[in-house]
Image (spheres, rainbow, N blue to C red):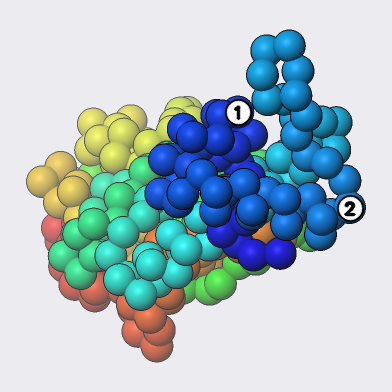
Amino acid sequence: MELAQLKYFQAMANIRQYTKAAQAVSVSQSALSRSMAKLEDELGVPLFQRGDAGLELTSAGEHFLFHVDRVLRELERAQQEIAELTEGSSGTVNLSFLHSFGGYILPMLLSEFHARYPQIQIKLNQNNSAYLAQQVAAGQTDLCLCSNMVMSDNVAWNYLWSEELFVVVPKDHPLATRASVTLAEIEAEPLITMKPSYSLRMVVDQSFELASSHPEIVFEGDDVNTLASLVAARLGVSLLPQIPSTEHLGIVYIPISFPTCRRAVGIAWNASRPLSPAALRFQQFIIKHFAGKKPAALQDDSWGQER
């Protein structure tokens, strides 16, 4: 059985007329007729029969058409993926990410990737940790920039970097000139933090628990820039990574001496299904970008600091 026979059969099954089907696949009518006869001999059953309305598929023909359609679709998909791998410059990637990455890490990464692969389209989805975990596990996104909180049997996660958290205070706060603070020292301060569904909030809660400190939470938000703005408005203090876009707000990022406050950040994907060539290329770009180094966006320690 040859690939050409399958394509000829598909054309015949859809057009149901030898002359037009032969034209559609660019062969002579006699060649098409011989090919269909040979195919029926190989299968041992008739695929077509004469009916009142003309040429019709037999029940065996209908069953065979279902599988031929699927085979040819898969073949076309495989050819497309191989072409993408060879060209290395086309396709679409569905990328999910945490809210806290949208203002500084992600734009830098997308800019570098787009400069290298301008024909690969990136579709973005921003959400909280719990929702992202469900997306990855369900195969609803290709890749996800997230903390290691996203874990399940079919989810793979590759470490990229460790993100330090700081105590964030207004520039005129009594602690603003300190070289470092402990979390116990801010227990009496009103705390501005993320909602419980975010990985950043989980790290904050764990850190305060280690410090045996339980500050009063006065606001729970969805966006790190909002939290930083509320700190600047003297509504309270917060625990955040350094955010370049907040440097104009008049806030200070103070290192935490105890306990160590960091969160691991990585890239996750559904390991039960193969990544598309475009998604695989983006995944490898991200992993290589962070291999053995801090992300460029975090190397400038002056970001967001006013002392």
**Identity, as a three-letter code, of the amino acid under mark 2:** Gly
> Residue most toward the front?
30
Q: Which residue is mark 1?
A: 16
> For the point 82% across and 56% down, which residue is it?
41
Image quarter of residue 2: bottom right
Q: Secondary structure at mark 2?
A: loop
Question: Eyeballing the image, is 290 above or below 133?
Answer: below
> Residue most toward the top?
52
Horizontal and vertical percent position of residue 94: 44, 48
Q: Left or right of 61: which side holds 268?
A: left
Crowd class of label 2 (few under 14; some 14 to 19; many from 20; radius 10 Å)? few
Residue 299 appears in the rendering: yes
Q: Which residue is mark 2?
A: 44
Crowd class of label 1 (few under 14; some 14 to 19; many from 20; radius 10 Å)? some
Horizontal and vertical percent position of residue 291: 40, 84
Horizontal and vertical percent position of residue 154: 74, 59
Horizontal and vertical percent position of residue 174: 27, 51
> Residue most toward the bottom?
292
> For the point 64% across and 54% down, which residue is it?
35
Name the foreground residue: 131 vs 222: 131
Question: Eyeballing the image, is 273 above or below 302?
Answer: above
Closer to the chain start, of discs 1 and 2, is 1
Q: Secondary structure at mark 1?
A: loop
Q: Left or right of 173: which side holds 85?
A: right
> For the point 23% across and 31% down, which residue is it?
233
Do the residues under discs 1 and 2 have CB atoms within 8 angstroms? Answer: no
**Identity, as a three-letter code, of the amino acid under mark 1:** Arg
The label on residue 271 is: none
